[in-house]
Amino acid sequence: MSINKYIHFLILLSIFNTYPTLSAQLLSHKATYTLNIQNIRDNSFLEGGKGQTFFEILENCNGWNIKEDYVLIYELPNNKTSNSFSSYSTFENFLGTKHSFELNEKSQFSGENSYQGFIEKNKKEISGSIITSSIKKLTFKKDILFPIEHLLELIKTAKIGEKILTKKVFFGNEDEEFIKIVSAFIGQIRNSTLEEIEYLKGKKIWPIKVAFYKEKSKQENPEYEIYLEIDDTGVVHSYKVDYGSFEIKALLKKFELLPKTICKK
């Protein structure tokens, strides 16, 4: 089982001329979420589980540095457990033309996995490399968004009152199927239900359901779905991942603002 498919969704959130301006709306911050496995179906081998994920997004002089670490302990039959650990980091520039990524994970389900890579947009296509024990070239069509591009486009779509956004998005947290078709269904804006964190208390959020499909799949059902509550600065107040056979509920428990980087002009 590859848990990093959904657990790094916070990183997983078209270039347009105002991209540098729009990037300023995202809030540099650290966030800690508690994770709980729930709604386990009969076809699941799990009996429960819990963990935490630690997320950080920081605006620097050239773009956005993002890092997400998680630990998840699965409860299995016969009082057994299985652990997963992962660290995933990315950089994306303000122009939306460069994106780099690095993944290191260790799981009792799928073993150890580590790689890094980068991709870049030119006038005709997107190209780059992924580095493991060897170097593999990557080439994609230019109609694909990077994660921060997609996040900004999602917030922009919600702000203007539109309800659906479907895009192809590159995600570097899977070393085989990098491109997903991502369909977002945006609900009515409302107040956040967070009470413990004063800075976010009473903020306006959009409830959004996001469905992920394989790029070339003809199946009607998505691989998995994520239900999230997000505000206009890109802070995710809570999220839930429906993996089909079980769900993981993530609740924001700790939040810290990060200072802006001082850049020389």
Image: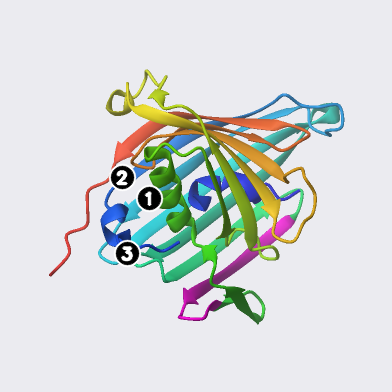
Amino acid type, mark 2: Leu
State left or right for residue 88 relative to residue 98: right
Residue flagged by tag 1: what amino acid is it? Ile
Label 1, secondary structure: give it.
Answer: strand
Tell me the distance, in whole angstroms, between the alpha carbons under discs 1 and 3: 23 Å
Q: Is residue 121 magenta?
A: yes
Ranked by sequence position, the earlier of labels 1 and 3 is: 3
In what quadrant of the picture does the C terminus appear?
bottom left
In the foreground, 217 or 102: 217
Above or below residue 43? Residue 215 is below
Q: Nearer the viewer, mark 1 or mark 3?
A: 3
State the residue position of label 2.
Answer: 27
Where is residue 150? Give x, y as percent.
47, 54
Label 3 sits on residue: 17
Residue range corresponding to the magenta coloring: 111-127
Point 64% across, 32% down: residue: 248
Q: Which residue is mark 1?
A: 57
Task: Please give left or right for residue 45 compared with residue 105 in the image.
Answer: right
Task: Pick whichever of labels 2 and 3 is earlier in the sequence.
Answer: 3
Q: Does 149 lie within the magenta span?
A: no
